[in-house]
Amino acid sequence: MQLKPVNDTRRVEEMEQELAKIRQENNELREKLAMIERQLETIYSWLFCLDRQKLDTDINFYTVFPNYATFLAMFEFLNPGVEGEDIRPRSSLTDVPENFYHGDSDEDCVPNAKKGHPGKLKPIEEFFIVLCHLRRGFSGCHLPNPYGMAQSTISKIFVPWIRFMFLKFGQLCMLPSKSVLRVG
């Protein structure tokens, strides 16, 4: 029975050695993680995205809106849905329901919206990309680079947004009524 304490002592020593190795590995992994987080922060600082362009001068330059608050107000007016579900591709522009222009409900705003899984960009970021393209004329070749996307992905964002904005802005009355225009 005296052999048992020797085995237990050896086992405890082995476990302590294994624990020391695990702690060392854990410290090495923490250092690597810290280094990778610093690298990611550096890379993120180079990215062109809405989060880095919130100054009023930047918003005005890239989108023509005078400030970030106006940009947000327009985005909220458009109301593309939390995940952008209201702007996904539709079969055609001719699928506009009768009550589209007269309905008060946002549910009536976009016909046949596909409910799919969202892209990797948030709808507000997609809106920003579309406005950059419209305002600055960034080509389909330029815009994918800062976002790390394929050119076809940018096209898949752009076309539905243009259709969506066309339908939403079509609800606005841009001209005064005939009675206001009549002089006399």
Image (tube, rainbow, N blue to C red):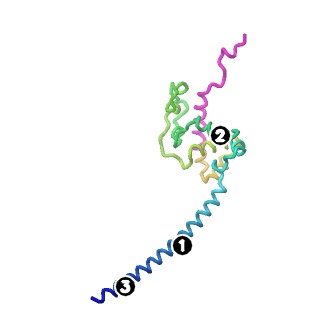
Q: From the top left corner, tell me how far across and down residue 19 is, in percent.
A: 44, 76
Q: Secondary structure at mark 3?
A: helix
- Residue wearing tag 2: 69
Q: Which mark is residue 88?
A: none
Tag nearer the camera, 2 or 3: 3
> To which residue does mark 3 refer?
9
Say which quarter of the image contains residue 36. bottom right
The question of residue 165 being in magenta is answered with yes
On the image, the x and y values in percent for residue 172 come to 61, 27
Q: Which residues are magenta?
A: 155-184
User: Quarter holding the C terminus?
Assistant: top right
For numbered disc 2, what is the local secondary structure? helix
Secondary structure, magenta segment, majority class:
helix
Measured in 3D between alpha carbons, the distance from the residue under mark 1 to the one under mark 2, in whole angstroms, is 45 Å
Q: CA distance from mark 1 to mark 3?
A: 29 Å
* Image side of residue 56 versus residue 12, left or right: right
Dot 2 amino acid type: Ala
